[in-house]
Amino acid sequence: MNAIIVSALLGVVMMFSGIFFQNKSIIKHIAAGCLLLLLGANLLQHYEIFTIKIDTHNLLRFEKMGIFFNTITIVATLIYVLLSGKDIENTGVHVAEYFALIFFILCGVSILTSFNGLLMLFLGIEIMSIPLYILTGTDKRNLKSNEAALKYFLMGSFSTGIMLMGITLIYGGSGNFQIGQAIVSSAAGTVPNASFLEVAGLLLLFSAMCFKVSAAPFHFWTPDVYDGAPSVFTSFMATIVKVTGFYAFIRLFENQNELLGPTWKIILSFVIIATLLVGNITAVFQQSVKRMLAYSSIAQAGFMLFGLYASNDLSKEGILLYSAAYCLATIGIFAVLIKMKDYTLDGFNGLAKTQPVLAFTATVCLMSLAGIPLTAGFFAKYYMLASVVKAGGSLMIVIVAVLFAAVSVYYYLRVIQAMYFKEGEAETTEITPSFKVGLVFVAILILLIGALPSVLLNYFYF
Amino acid sequence: MSKLVYLIPLFPLLGFLINGLGRKHLSKSMIGIIGTGSILASFIVSVLVFFDVKATGTSTVVTLFNFIQVKGLLIPFAFQVDQLSVIFLLIITGIGTLIHLYSTAYMHTEEPAHFGRYFAYLNLFIFSMLLLVLGANYVIMFIGWEGVGLCSYLLIGYWFKNNNYNYAAKKAFVMNRIGDLGFLLAVFWLIFKLGTATYSDVFLHVDKLSAFDITAITTLLFVGAMGKSAQIPLYTWLPDAMAGPTPVSALIHAATMVTAGIYMIARTNLLYSMAPGTQTLIAIIGLATAIFAATIALKQNDIKKVLAYSTVSQLGYMFLGLGVGAYTGAVFHVMTHAFFKALLFLGAGSVIHAMHHEQDITKMGGLKKFMPITHITFLLACLAIAGIPPFSGFFSKDEILMAAYAKNPIYYYVGLGGALMTAFYMFRLYTLTFLGGFRGTQAQASHVHESPIAMTFPLIVLAILSVIGGLIGIPEVFAKDAHSLGNFLTPIFAQSAALATEHHLEASQEYLFMGVSTLLIAGIIFYTISSYKKYQSTETENTGLAKLLENKWYIDELYDAIIVKPLNAIAVFFKNIIEKNIIDGGVNGVGKLVSYSSRQIRLLQSGQVGNYVLIMVLAIVVFILIWFNDLTLSYYLNRLFKNA
Amino acid sequence: MIPLLLILIPLLSGLAVFFLKEARSSKALALGSSVITLALSLMAVSSKGVLHYDASWLPGLGGRFTLMQDGMGKMLGLLTAISFPVVFAATYKNTYQKPAAFYGLMLLTQAGLLGVFLAADALLFYFFWELALIPVYFLCSIWGGEKRIVVTFKFFIYTFIGSLLMLVGILFVYAQTADHSFALQSFYNVQLTGKQQAYVFALFFIAFAIKMPIFPLHTWQPDAYEQAPTATTMILSGVMVKMGLFAVIRWVLPMVPGAVKGHALFVIILSVIGMVYASLIAIKQDDLKRLIAYSSIAHIGLMCAAIFTQNQIGLEGVMIQMFNHGINVIGLWIVADVIEQQLGTRKFSELGGLAQKAPTLAILLVVLALANVALPLTNAFVGEFLLFNGLFQYNIWIAAVAGISIILSAVYTLNMIQKIFYGNTVEKTNNAVEIDFNVQVVLGVLVVLVLVMGVYPQPMIDLTKDTVNAIFAHR
Amino acid sequence: MSITEILFFFLSALAIGSAIMVLVSKNPVYSVLWLVAVFFAISGHYILLNAQFLAIVNLIVYAGAIMVLFLFVIMLMNLNAHSEPQKNLWMKLAGVISGGCFLMVLVSLVRQANELSNKKALTVEGNIGLIKNLGKVLFNDYVVSFEITSVLFLSAMIGAIVIGKKD
Amino acid sequence: MPIQYYIYLCLTLFSIGIIGVLTRRNAIIVFMCVELMLNAVNLLLVAFSKMHLATALVADKATKVGTDGQLFVFFIMVVAAAEVSVGLAIIVMLYRNTHSVDINFLNRLKN
């Protein structure tokens, strides 16, 4: 509860900070301070030192894992603000409002990590989505940004409709807004003796959640929106918002494996493979790094879906690690990308010569995204695959996944090639030393988690 | 004394090392002394060992260390000294010494570094050859076996600036390798069945081998012998090997290395005696080679080529001997052949030396008066090889032919035909070279001279040996137990002798054959000398059979067409088509497929919200359909993703 | 402690080299560190028994930092430890842009390689497997030849696919282990059904087959060897291809004996096809590096086939041949490098007559080339003798077909010698000079090793005997 | 046929008919008006189901506020039938077919659902839809979510300002 | 009333909403169709709430079963209102820049 309340309040604080401080960079620092505050509040609850206790009438259910996930998102946001804060300032005039919206989104994140029942899920998702529609459209003069905002909004509200229909059907079947209680499972291999309405509702809900986490074939908004949105906000959308969607998704469906029967796995594998296929294959041809990253985020979603596919302890741990690894790497690479004058691959040519630190950290981030050992991304992918194997899932789908992972190496490496092996004068905007320090910190964090993932998992989580 | 046998290969090895490493720093005379001296030392030790063996009559195995020892296989680095190896030791070191001596003079025009290289190679060759004959198991023999092949390669390509020589060297090595593969397979077979490659163990446990095993092993070993001893179909390298310096031809390609096959089969005589099928094969191939090579030799004009084909032919006789079970005869012929063929080559070398590297006999003639010693020794050698009694060749060849008759009279008649051809081409060679008028250029005429003492001394020694060498193998018909070589070797061949059914010819029949063959050969010799004495070189081209013979039956061309060219074609096909297009193309194809599908799938991202929503709706419909109906699609998907 | 130090020294010195500025000091540090590693490795070889090191690493996952150095580990550790100083010394005069990065990456590669050979924990093994790959990617892409980027890219993705499949295999086995551990012993003790074994075998073997490489998964190799900087190529072909062979012996053979038996014929036939195929292609190569590359494919094919014959003689042969092939091929690459550095070409059609200009080089190369064709009394003979023996005991006909490569190897090796050294000098070789002293020394050392190992191979056989016995005892 | 049923069918027909008209009207203004009609019909259904609170809210919020907002925007943009873009026929057909598929699949599913047999929705009976009852529950059990919606509104407000305000 | 009637009605309205999204190009109309979908959902929720109430009333006369369904409708309306304000703001912004609300022209971002 701490995080929900504090983030909402801090959002209001940020709203008003715009009135009192005209200097934009002060606002950034305030935001960073507020984030630290939020982190503190969340950690207080994590270590059970001080918790705001409110009777939620069973609408929210707090568990250690969710709170830990909050910590991850808050830290990621903090890093994001520290790295890209300057670029948020440059996006438009309403800087304080942007930060306020970010805090509201974090409020939505906190709700989604603790929802109990479909009502809070719905509200959480909307609280997270509506500010995003706005953030997407903040570059008002830019037609791409406008277009992205409208597309995102239209498709987002459409998916909300689908989701609500799903919720309604579930309600019709079970009489309440909890899921998965009225379904009676029967012998393996046959269709469970479930309420038809409820199953249909679950499928609709599933589709809507797929939309939110941009799983194929509901992913179409992702490349366009990520591409059109101002890069700073793409970074935020692609990381914190996305992994939260996953967390909610898995929280929602974690017990559905047995209940929905074997057919469920087929649908899920279909979605996973389609996601991996679309994300990885399409990314190969992209010339714009930003758009490539958009597709790569779809591909990463495919991997995260394995957590849903396996749905066991390992996959929950894995999704935490995956979130951390993915957020770090993506925030890092976007922070570099934002500094580039040219977002195309050729724009990165020779970056290693002009900006060795940037190139090195970008390489670490890309390697982490590609899942190469000794980076955090490896263990993230590792957990996902391991959870499927451990759950006795199909080995075939794991093999397909690793083959696509190899494809992903192809496009990630192209950026590294451009930076290190190609001739060119990559142009960047002004790079401050503190920015470099921040990047190196991110890179070290990635490598540290890559070498000793148990530090993250055991020390904080258990 | 036999315990010191390791000294025998050690000296040449030291010689090789000193000459090889110090070739830039040593003077030529020093190199010559070291090279020749090391072999001489070996020879002396060999002689001592010989008398030791002769006295005790036992075979000794000296193990130096364990070469390879793994579970189930022990291959010691061991030497075996017995009657057979001692004979070969004497031949190798003895003739080796003479040829080293000869080389110091023959090669005197070389630069010191190359001179050193030459002697290093020669020493290395002697070392390898000694390993070959001394080894107490097939693996050590194989070490020497390949080692001599290597030295042959190095020496044929000694003048490495000439690419033709290099090709010849390569050809020799590769053809030897083909044979070596057979040898190796045979060794593997032995190890597989018996778990050992040591002679004594193999012969002790020979009863564990099935008849098929024995036939296969012996055949494969014989393939090895084919390569090394230049038998059909692997003989073509030997004539080409004449690219090397002439002493090398004398040592390697006449006296020693090419007889390794005979040594090996003689060593393995027990197995061969147990495999009559292989014996027949050997006899037929040997005989065919003898005749075939003799026909080619009839029409060759290069002095060394004639001798090369003659060597091939003589080797064929030796294999005939092995094939009919006359192991002693074969070894005997190895020995006599070593004497007279080395002599012939050295004589030829002397001639070539005198003629300033002219090798075409049609451009020689009348050298008798310029080079008396060479002439006399050469004539003696020719008589020996032609088989005129009492020269050495007569006894050894006769022994083989008699044994062949005992086995199958056809062998004898064909073999005799070969012997007649031998007489013809040898005396054609002799006549064209030494008799008649000088047909060379004026410049050559002014320079023709007898060779220095270092060259003529070996000639004289070998000539003596060629003349009297046969006396150690006087046939039984002349005197009981006169065949001292046979007696000496008895322990080696005792087991096969026990297997073979002895059927000697009647003494009268034997006399008859000897007489007739001697008369025929003498007739041929007279005919040849008289017809070629007045020879004048004509420019007319040979036709018909003569042309066929002059071009060696076009065997090289045939091999080129049926083996080399197809192999090259396949290699090119593999390289340019399979590798580039299919295998690498397949790999790249996957990459291309990915980028192609990338471009196609990308088009789905049309930018149209309507299309996006359409696909989403359809996906939902499909999901519901999959869940609620056991559609064919879902059935297959189910099968596909069933748990492993 | 020695196993840990073996990995740590190159790792730390590799990281340290990155921070050096001067070429001289980075070279010196790299050489010094590699010599220390060599000394440590010799200590390991001289010590008795199996060396262990164990530390906690991933408590939640069941992965531990476990190192084990048995006979095979000692032998390959020695090979790695010898290779690097040799390579550094032989290429001491080569100049690189950004030398610090070059030597740093090389040392990281060494750490990765040693880790692979010592790891006794599947996850750790996988880590080192990749750690060995990534520096090579950068080495080849930055300092390689003209087509380096494309070629290295292919190489990287190719091997990466393989290692990902191996990862799946590791995960699968891990899930089946009784104690949910990645430890080598747990993997050995795992009970798998026939079908599971087949899956695991396929997953592991593809990774290793790509690394070796086995026909038809080999096409990355000639390109990569050709384009990589020669110092890296030496490591690639001298040591890195051994990773595949090593891994099959260490991880596949004892873990899924049933599947190995079931697929042996298939693998052997592939290997033998590869041998003959690669040999034939080698005959037609005009490029020295590509020739050596294809020759290497042929040799590795034989070793792979021998592993799958599953008899003791063959396996002993693989052990000794892994070492020998490493030594020989590094020597050949050094020669290739010397020629390319001096004359600026590797094409046979532009070479010739070098024996007149550089007789020492010619002699050294001839010895190495003869080792390449496995002539007796060179080291490779002992190995190939045992390998063929093993293969023969498996199937006579396959051994006979494989034997063809003995002949073909003579053809292409002699071709190479002839075209480079014999004949008359041509335009490019007219002004050639004898090689530098440091290269002479290095090659001399290698040649001595070749001969010593060829005459007296027993110590090496004894060194690896324990591994072989353990594998056969396990079955 | 009871009066309830007659009302039900009438309202349903009105709702569906108006909804279709929303789609087919070329003039956006008409579409808005037809949509208002749909909302009225739905409000009628609410009343029929004795959900008085929702009926009123629906009228006020949807038909009143939201639709008027729409109407204002349309009028602001001066959109009319002439400026109204039309999709090509195939796209329309594809849209109708896929929407029809969606409907068909769900309807057939409902027809198969056993658990719905003999289930009825109370129309007049039951007073849970009264403001008093709803209010009690809302401010007891659902107070947290009610408060949380304030965050939603705040962000929507900020959004409208950020997006709508001319820089 | 049998619950099926309500389900069919609402599904029909929902599908009409979907068809509208698929067939219209005017962003405002598309958005209106989404609103139509939401309303269909609302009605269905109310119908279900009364259905569950009917079941529960048999056992307990004072039951409050079904309230949650109607409250959910309330929250949907709240959210819809918020969405509309943001959505219309976005549409207006776009119109200001392009003078069009045709979603088919929204194809600067593709592939």
Image (tube, rainbow, N blue to C red):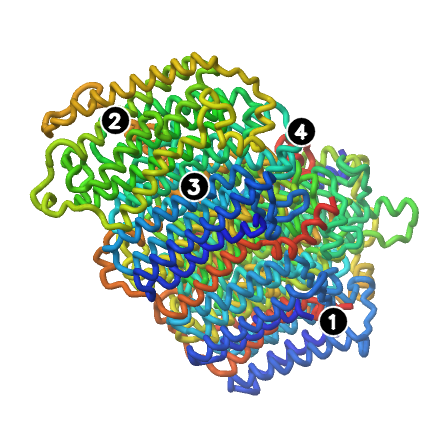
Which chain letter goes with mark 3?
B
Question: Mark 3 or 4 closer to N-term?
Answer: 3
Residue C25, position as x, y percentages in the image: 46, 80
Q: Do labels 4 and 2 share a chain?
A: yes
**Residue at the image position 53 percent from the left and 77 percent from the top:** C16
* Image position of A352 with respect to A194: above or below: below
Spatial CA span between label 4 and label 1: 72 Å
Question: Which of the marked residues, 4 or 2, is nearer the chain's N terminus?
Answer: 4
In three-dimensional space, the C-alpha distance between marks 4 and 2, rounded to whole angstroms, equals 48 Å
How far apart marks 2 and 1 lie (CA) works out to 99 Å
The residue under label 2 is B425
- What residue type is disc 4 on? Lys
Residue under numbered circle 1: A460
Give x and y (percent) for residue B132. Answer: 49, 43
Q: Mark 1 lies on which chain?
A: A
Q: Which chain letter goes with mark 4?
A: B
- Residue position marked by numbered label 3 in the rendering: B91
